[in-house]
Image (spheres, rainbow, N blue to C red):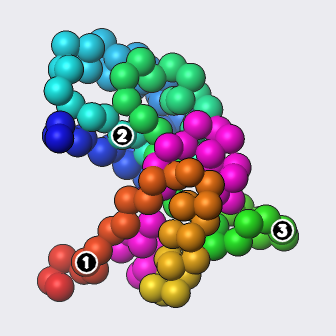
Amino acid sequence: MNPIIAANWKMNLTKTEAAELISQVNATMDPLTNIELIIAPGHCYLDLVQSTLKKGAVAAQNISEYTGGAYTGEISAQMAKSCGAAYAILGHSERRHVFHETNEMIRKKLELCYGNGIVPIVCVGETLDE
């Protein structure tokens, strides 16, 4: 198994900055043949990263626990998959602490990942002290 580098961009970068960073990543990663790269950009950049990243895969930073409906600002597993996400980060400590996500919510998201052919990256652990 190759080493994995996963980069979560969180809520950072403009579209121009994202394109420039991917250009730099493409130039850097080419000779690193034994590294599996996973990039988790903001949802609005999934298509951009998926279409321009030469080596690696794209992850959604989160998916909704719902398949669709009136959930403003959410992204469904199906939407993420259609934009090129091969992975989804679930249960990040920020999601648990800031948005009060529960294990039950994360379980629902896991099921949606499996049902849509997305590999879940499940975060465990909580605060730095814990």
Q: Secondary structure at mark 3?
A: loop
Q: Is residue 50 above or below residue 110?
A: above
Q: Earlier in the sequence, mark 3 or mark 1?
A: 3
Dot 1 amino acid type: Gly
Relative to 22, is 25 on the left or the right?
Answer: left
Q: Which mark is residue 7?
A: none
Q: Nearer the viewer, residue 10 or 68?
A: 68
Quadrant containing the C terminus in the rendered view: bottom left
| Crowd tier of the residue under label 3, counting other residues whose Cα lies within 10 Å: few below 14, some 14–19, many 20 or above | few
The image's mark for residue 69 is 3
* Residue 31 in the image: above or below residue 59: above
- The residue depicted at 17 percent of the width and 41 percent of the height is 1
Instruction: Work out whether residue 6 or residue 116 is closer to the camera in this orientation and state it.
Output: 116
* Sooner in the amino-acid sequence: mark 2 or mark 1: 2
Q: Residue furthest right?
A: 70
How far apart are the alpha carbons under marks 3 and 1?
31 Å
In magenta, the rendered stretch is: 76-98
Task: Tell me if I can see residue 12 in this picture.
Answer: no
Asked which secondary structure carries label 2, the reply is strand
At which x and y percent is residue 35?
21, 31
In contact (CB < 8 Å): disc 2 and disc 1: no
Residue 71 appearing in the image: yes
Callout 1 secondary element? loop
Tell which of 69 and 119 is nearer to you. 119
Q: Residue drawn at (24%, 41%), measured in percent from left and top?
A: 5
Residue to which mark 1 is pinned: 125
At x 56%, y 23%, the residue is: 51
According to the image, label 2 marks what residue? 38
How crowded pointer 2 is (Cα within 10 Å; few <14, some 14-19, many 20+) is rated as some
Q: Amino acid at mark 2?
A: Ile
Q: In the image, is residue 87 part of the stretch drawn in magenta?
A: yes
Residue type beneath disc 3: Gly
